[in-house]
Image: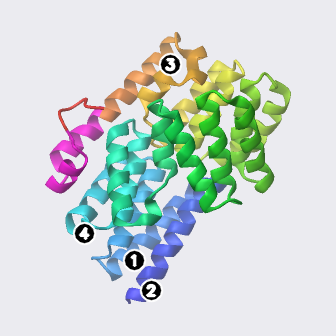
Amino acid sequence: VVERARLLVRLGRHDAETAEFAGDVALYDTAERAVAEALELDPDSAEAATVLGLIHLERGENLRALEDFAKVIERAPDHAPAWDGLSYLFKNTGFWEYALAAHERAAKLDPKFAYSIRRLSVLIYLDRFQEAVAEAEALVARRPKFAHYNYWRGIAAFYSGDRRVARHWIEKGLELDPTDPIAQGVLAFTLAAEGETARARDLLKLAEPGAAADGTFTYWIAKVHALLGEQDAALDWLGRSAELGYWDSPWMRKDQTMMSLADRPDFLEHLTQLDGRRLGLETSLHRAAPTLLVAELRVGSLHSS
């Protein structure tokens, strides 16, 4: 029974990851059914409950994901993947200090979480660019041929102001995996920023079908449209990213690549709506999270992030 539960958890995680990369939201249902069955077989499985939280997070159900991770931590406070899941959730929802605190806890519990895209992203948001580059270099050193880490090394360089280095690493990421829609989208982003609009649009067409089930990636697609001057399309993709749980309004206000939208009333309304969703999430954190979680995240008063 336990072994079948473990296999179902692996199947569910595989289906959820495939949904993200293939842009197939229906696979989230398949993934959730597999993990729900695993929990029926082994109700105390921290692994299964954490994967269920990740599925809820990736399909945009942030409040459910918070509840899932909090329950795991209440029962199994040393389960590192649950802390990593929280870091992912807080990164996507604009609670940057909470994301770093959750990452720190995960890394202390399991060295495989010592470096992560979650932490790298937040370091960029906080203008801690040297640390962001170092984080990206550590990830590339861990898996030199992994496209995802290579183009994130380029993203760190882009936001630190070194576009020549950024272009090198982002192009290398696409070379390592030419069919990766995220690699295509990130290169489209770089090209659009450099004014190479024709090739940017070609890559964007290839990338967009893979963005239908990934809130962070939909935000990147919005950024490309914004850089191309296609404001209505950018706002459409921002709406999609919100429905998939990307609520990081503090970053959207700060992100230099979104400045073409800064004065549009509908963009400002979008940010206000996200602020409301973030407040709801933080209120849930205060009301429902176990004492250990609140203490570890150093949660203060509302609106602390």
Q: Nearer the viewer, mark 4 or mark 2?
A: 4
Query: Where, by quadrant of the figure, is residue 304 drawn?
Result: top left
Three-letter residue code for mark 2: Arg
Given residues 79 and 205, the one toward you in this image is 79
- Tell me which secondary structure the magenta stretch mostly adopts: helix
Give the percent coordinates (x, y) of residue 106. 36, 59
Which quarter of the image is occupied by the N terminus? bottom left
Label 3 neighbour load within 10 Å: few <14, some 14-19, many 20+:
many
Label 4 neighbour load within 10 Å: few <14, some 14-19, many 20+:
some
Cα separation between marks 1 and 2: 7 Å
Residue, disc 1: 38
Residue, disc 2: 4
Q: Which mark is residue 267?
A: 3
Q: Residue at x 38, y 59 (%)?
A: 107
Which quarter of the image is occupied by the C terminus? top left
Q: Is label 3 in a helix, a strand or a loop?
A: helix
Cα separation between marks 1 and 3: 42 Å
Q: Is label 4 in a helix, a strand or a loop?
A: loop
Q: Earlier in the sequence, mark 3 or mark 2?
A: 2
* Residue 301 left/right relative to 178: left
Given residues 161 and 247, the one toward you in this image is 161
Given residues 233 and 201, the one toward you in this image is 201
Question: Does residue 121 show up magenta in the picture?
Answer: no
Residue, disc 4: 76
Give the percent coordinates (x, y) of residue 171. 78, 43
Three-letter residue code for mark 3: Phe
Cα separation between marks 4 and 3: 41 Å
Three-letter residue code for mark 4: Ala
Question: Does residue 283 show up magenta in the picture?
Answer: yes
Span of residues in magenta: 279-299
Three-letter residue code for mark 1: Ala
